[in-house]
Amino acid sequence: MSGSSDLYLKPTALLTGAAGRARGMAAPLAGGPVAFTAVEVIRRHGKARDVVVRGLDALREVTAMSKRLEAISAVRPPFAGLTLDRPRLMGVINVTPDSFSDGGRYAHRDKAIAHGQALLQAGADILDVGGESTRPGAAPVSRQEEMDRVIPVVAALAKDGALVSIDTRHAAVMREALAAGARIVNDVTALAGDSGSLAAVAASDAAIVLMHMQGEPRTMQQEPAYVDAPLDIYDFFAERLTACAAAGIERSRIALDPGIGFGKRDPHNVAILADLALYHGLGCVLLLGVSRKSFIGRLSRNEDANNRLAGSLAAALAGIERGAQIVRVHDVAETAQALAIWQAIAAGHPA
């Protein structure tokens, strides 16, 4: 299930509904509601790709390919106890004065806690609490300030029974948040930004989101460069999964987030979204965060962050149709509504 430096399998000819359930011709994508009937076998040669489309039967006849197909189609175990039989929503709680979309709105702990409770009522399955903005150009804050912002919020929401994720790149904050009741660590540096992060997560039973970011928040949008963005990120994840395994973190605890907008220009973002199903070759849960991000405005009419709901929903549903199992969103109620309609159409009947 680990990556190859030159050979990749991307599920294609994706289906939902009754056609998707015809498993004789199609295989389930990560055991979910989307299925695939063919695979793009990709070999990379620098910036060029050699792509051959193969049917499932042809690949099953090759032992090595058959094992990789099994990794792509296998049902993923519950993530932090949350079953993945349907797409799940991670609601965003920024306890910060300077986040790109809602900075300052929930900086006070009581407002943040109330917002978390409202997100649960709106349909959030996970609450992602962050105390340091990682928007482009953001400056870091001290560990103590970050903990002062998030720990009371994490503790209160966890006490109420919420499944809480801590959005941090610092090991000290991870440890304190896990002790306060968080059950997921969401790290924009994929546990590589702090030398103690791997050990902090390994010492717990927490689930982990490994996100890809090229560079760091203050400088990540200054000329980001890739040979082939989707494949480069695949290789990055393969390396981080190897590091996690060496630290004793099982793959079943891990979700992968390609980090849309984090050290990526619009062509990179679009290519990654188009190739999203590729990452299921690594055998992990797939998480996607596109909510209100600036690429939506640039691809549309330069709308500001508070006027990107329609684009956020379009991008989220496109991700789900390519196998994303968790979507990280600001607008939980609206996304839940869009997802309910998508699920009913995909199933061919009301849920």
Image (cartoon, helix red, strand yellow):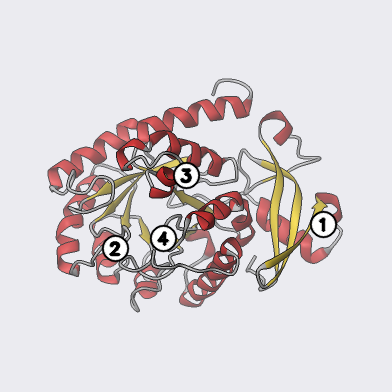
Q: Which residue is mark 3?
A: 299
Tell which of 324 and 224 is nearer to you.
224
Which of label 3 and label 2 is nearer to you? 3
Tell which of 204 and 149 is nearer to you.
149
Q: Position of residue 42 (x, y in %)?
A: 73, 62
* Disc 2 secondary structure class: loop
Label for residue 59? 1
Q: Residues within 10 Å of mark 1 (few under 14, many from 20)?
A: some
Q: Residue at x 35, y 55 (%)?
A: 183
Left or right, 83 with reference to 15:
left
Q: Which residue is mark 4?
A: 262
Which of label 4 and label 3 is nearer to you? 3
- Inter-mark Cα distance, 1 to 2: 45 Å
Q: Position of residue 223 (x, y in %)?
A: 43, 68
N-term-proximal mark, 3 vs 1? 1
N-term-proximal mark, 1 vs 2? 1
Kind of residue indicated by mark 2: Gly
- Inter-mark Cα distance, 4 to 3: 17 Å
Q: Residue at x 63, y 69 (%)?
A: 3
User: Hey, which quadrant is residue 144 in on the image?
Assistant: bottom left
* Disc 3 secondary structure class: helix
Q: Which residue is mark 2?
A: 137
296, above or below 225, in the image: above
Q: Position of residue 300 (x, y in %)?
A: 45, 40
- Inter-mark Cα distance, 2 to 4: 11 Å
